Image (tube, helix red, strand yellow):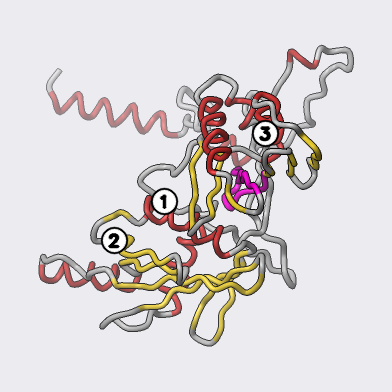
Amino acid sequence: MNSALKGMLVATVALATVGCARDGYYHDRNLDYAEAEEAAPLVLPEARNPARYRDAMPVPEVSGARPAADGVVEAPLPQALSPGRARERGDVERREIGSDAWLVVGAEPASVWPELERFAQGRGLQVIARDPSRGVLETEQARLSVRQGLRRGDSELHCERGGAVDVGCLRALERHFESLSASASAASLTAQRPEVQDRARFEQRGDDWQVILPYDIDRLWAEFSHQLEIDFAVEGRRELRERDPSAHSFLVDYLTREGREQGLLSSLASLELGAKPQPVRLTLEARGPEQTVLRAVGVGEAGALSEEDQRELLERVAGLLR
């Protein structure tokens, strides 16, 4: 059979089977979804052994949604894309600003508290008062405390004596939780489901945007210092240039959305590199003991940021707390 006859035969067979796509050999499953009907949920016998049954494909709870205001639900903050996650669950890191220092543990306070008590017991500390609801463990040697971290699923650990940081105690705490995170016992630290919290509120004042964060300014500066060092490390896109703990500010280079769009057009036209990052000052201002305002101000020859660029940058920075 020559090639022409073969082609005619194939075309004839194809035309013959088109009408059989629904009930013939080639079943079109797309139509099944359109015509599917909801069935009653499966009910297991009451006498079953619950230990033998679990969800094969569990659906996680929705987190991060902010409550509705005037009937409008605002979408949660986006998670910033970074070269790598700043911290794995169960890991331990130190934060410092001035003479203050504390630990950040990748686990919920409810999981960290029992380990804090084990630490005190193992070190032979004499407990004189304990308040699990406040996360405070008073001993004759030092005051240990744990509270919710700035990022969801994190805890902050403090160890103080006479109102100042007990460096030796903090170092011992760090070694304790580092050894724990390196062992199989770390699974107990990550068992708690993170709380859903409304962490950031955006406000527009005239042509400027700002973010209201319900945290102490020193805690925020220390956490942002760590997170910006990791996330703002992409040359030509976003880079951390300076940190000023006394002024609670950061100087970053950021390629704004407007700059990216203009750079794309110019690069297509000239086959050269596009726009350059713009220097931006990120500032933190205390509005109260547990409230801080975050702003983004353009500096240098580029001038002020547009409303859209301010909002985009602030969303990215605030998203580092997730």
Magenta segment: 146-161
| Label 2 residue SS | loop
Q: Is residue 311 above or below residue 18?
A: below
Task: Confirm or deny contact between disc 1 and disc 3 (CB under 8 A).
Answer: no
Q: Residues within 10 Å of mark 3 (few under 14, many from 20)?
A: many
Query: Where is mark 2, residue-wise?
Result: 237
Q: Measuring from the top left, give residue 85's x and y in whole percent.
A: 43, 42
Disc 3 residue type (three-letter) = Leu
How many residues crowd mark 2 within 10 Å: few (<14), some (14–19), many (20+)? some
Residue 246 forms part of the magenta stretch: no
Q: Earlier in the sequence, mark 1 or mark 2?
A: 1
Q: Quadrant of the N terminus?
A: top left
Q: Nearer the viewer, mark 1 or mark 3?
A: 3
**Does residue 301 appear to the left or right of 137 in the view shown?**
left
Q: Position of residue 147 (x, y in %)?
A: 67, 47
Which callout, 3 or 2, points at the residue further toward the start of the chain? 3
- At horizontal 40% and vertical 56% (from top left) the residue drawn is 228
Q: Is residue 193 left or right of residue 311?
A: right
For the point 15% across and 28% down, which residue is it? Answer: 4
The residue that disc 3 covers is: 116
Q: Amino acid at mark 2?
A: Arg
Q: Is residue 132 left or right of residue 168?
A: right
How far from the left and from the top, in percent, is residue 150?
A: 59, 53
Which residue is the site of mark 1?
A: 81
- Residue 160 covered by magenta stretch: yes
Compared to 320, does 129 lie above or below? above
Describe the element under mark 3 as helix, strand or loop. Answer: helix
- Residue situated in front as seen by the camera: 45 or 51: 51
Give the Cα distance between marks 1 and 3. Answer: 33 Å
Choose between 322 and 138: the one closer to the eye. 138
Residue at 61% in and 32% down: 190
- Seen in the image, is 242 located left or right of residue 134? left
